[in-house]
Image: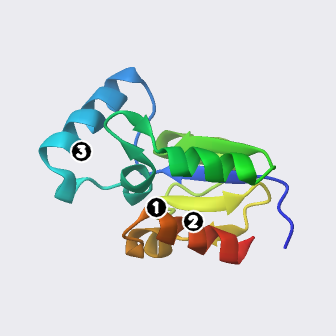
Amino acid sequence: MRMNGLIFVYNARSGVFNSLINYFHKMISPATYECNLCSLTYNNYGQLKAWKQFIKSLNIPTYFKYSDHLSEIGLDKQTNLPIIVSTDLYVVASAEEINQCQTIDALIEVIREKI
């Protein structure tokens, strides 16, 4: 299936204040952090190099959104997050699939299998 673009929706809220809360939450109590998409693709220094390279290799538009953007995207507020959808809202990776991934390589493989 050829995608027009991908939307990665984090189980976190947007904004500087929320970013700081998330940063410290991941440092202090990573086991209770609720966004495996965040945990797999970012460390405390920023986006992982392997993830950046993968996103660039897709050669399609990519969008990164947060839980407070669901209505803007066209997703229901009850959507289980994190989630990866195409721009036409086809589910590429559900919260369950993302949360089962233990490594960035596993997440990348899940996405590649769907696109």
Instruction: Name the amino acid type tagged 3.
Output: Lys
Extreme residue toward the left, this view:
28
Residue 49 place in picture, x, y as percent: 51, 44
Left or right side of 57 for 68 = left
Residue 26 place in picture, x, y as percent: 24, 44
Residue at the spot x=55%, y=50% of the render?
A: 51
Residue 32 place in picture, x, y as percent: 19, 57
Image quarter of residue 110: bottom right
Give the Cα separation between the discs numbered 1 and 3.
16 Å
Name the residue carrying label 2: 108
Return the disc, 3 or 2, that comes first in the chain's sequence.
3
Disc 3 is placed on an element classified as: helix
User: Around disc 3, counting alpha carbons within 10 Å, would you say few (fewer than 14), some (14 to 19), or many (20 or more)?
Assistant: some
Name the residue carrying label 3: 26
Are the residues at dot 1 and dot 2 in contact (C-beta closer than 8 Å)? Answer: yes
Image mark for residue 88: none
* 108 versus 53 height, above or below: below
Instruction: Name the amino acid type tagged 2.
Output: Ile
Disc 2 is placed on an element classified as: helix
Instruction: Name the amino acid type tagged 1.
Output: Ile
